[in-house]
Amino acid sequence: MAESLPDLIRRWQAGWGVSRGFRPAEESRGGLRVLLEQPDRHREVIALSAEPDVLRGLVEEVAAAERPTWLSVPANRPEEAEAIVREAGLKLRDGREALMTIPLRRHPPRPAPPPYTGATTMNGAVCETVLRHPDAGVAARGTMAVVGTDAIADRIETVPDHRRRGLGSVVMSSLAENAVARGATTGILMATADGHQLYSALGWSTRATVLIAQSPAG
């Protein structure tokens, strides 16, 4: 049986929280609440449902927040969700994101092209892969948090001077291989528009479009 979208959102958030070192989320009224304590992002509310009645309640909560608060809305009908968010006066961030998954054993292998070399380390449940160039140092990096049988990819980054060389694919391949070795079976991530192209090419499937908005206080 395919997992439900709310369950997938919970699993993504659990791994994202481990990767970033956040406290466990609090769940109520159809949303997860995460304390980030960043100057421009004190708290984030993650909608477990984009159904209008649920979403309106979450939108009103974020709109009334006194400190900068973000709202993330995974949705299969993003236009309807966007209308509700806009009606409340929240500021939509540029670019929609995507919640994506893959069976990790199907992830294609991508070796590092010469002269790049890669190294992978573990810090608790978080796996980090770093690619280096012999003359320029760190060229690309990324992490995966292994939580149960899930592996949540996060902060997949390539240094600007080293882009368009397939290094993001190499990082993802290494992370997936190491996550499988630690018992993970499913990869989950939240992709930006640029990242969506990369992950789709690697076989990841889009499960929902994600809208991100900010409170007026943000």
Image: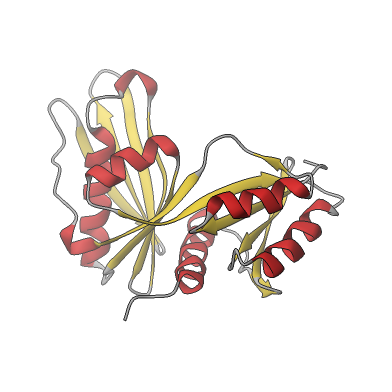
| Residue pictured at 61% horizontal, 47% vertical | 212
Using the image as rendered, state which of residue 51 and residue 66 is in the foreground: 51
When asked about the image quadrant of residue 213, the answer is: top right
The answer to whether residue 107 is above or below residue 142 is below
Visible residue check, residue 37 = no
Q: Position of residue 85 (x, y in %)?
A: 70, 50
Q: Position of residue 129 (x, y in %)?
A: 31, 45
Using the image as rendered, state which of residue 190 and residue 56 is in the foreground: 56
Q: Is residue 24 left or right of residue 133?
A: right
Q: Position of residue 189 (x, y in %)?
A: 40, 54
The answer to whether residue 34 is above or below residue 26 is above
User: How did the renderer colour the structure?
Assistant: secondary structure
Q: Position of residue 216 (x, y in %)?
A: 81, 42
Using the image as rendered, state which of residue 138 and residue 38 is in the foreground: 38
The answer to whether residue 94 is above or below residue 89 is above
Q: Quadrant of the N terminus?
A: bottom left
When asked about the image quadrant of residue 118, the answer is: top left
Q: Is residue 138 left or right of residue 66?
A: left
| Residue pictured at 65% horizontal, 68% vertical | 31
| Residue pictured at 32% horizontal, 38% vertical | 197
Q: Is residue 42 left or right of residue 165?
A: right
Visible residue check, residue 164 = yes
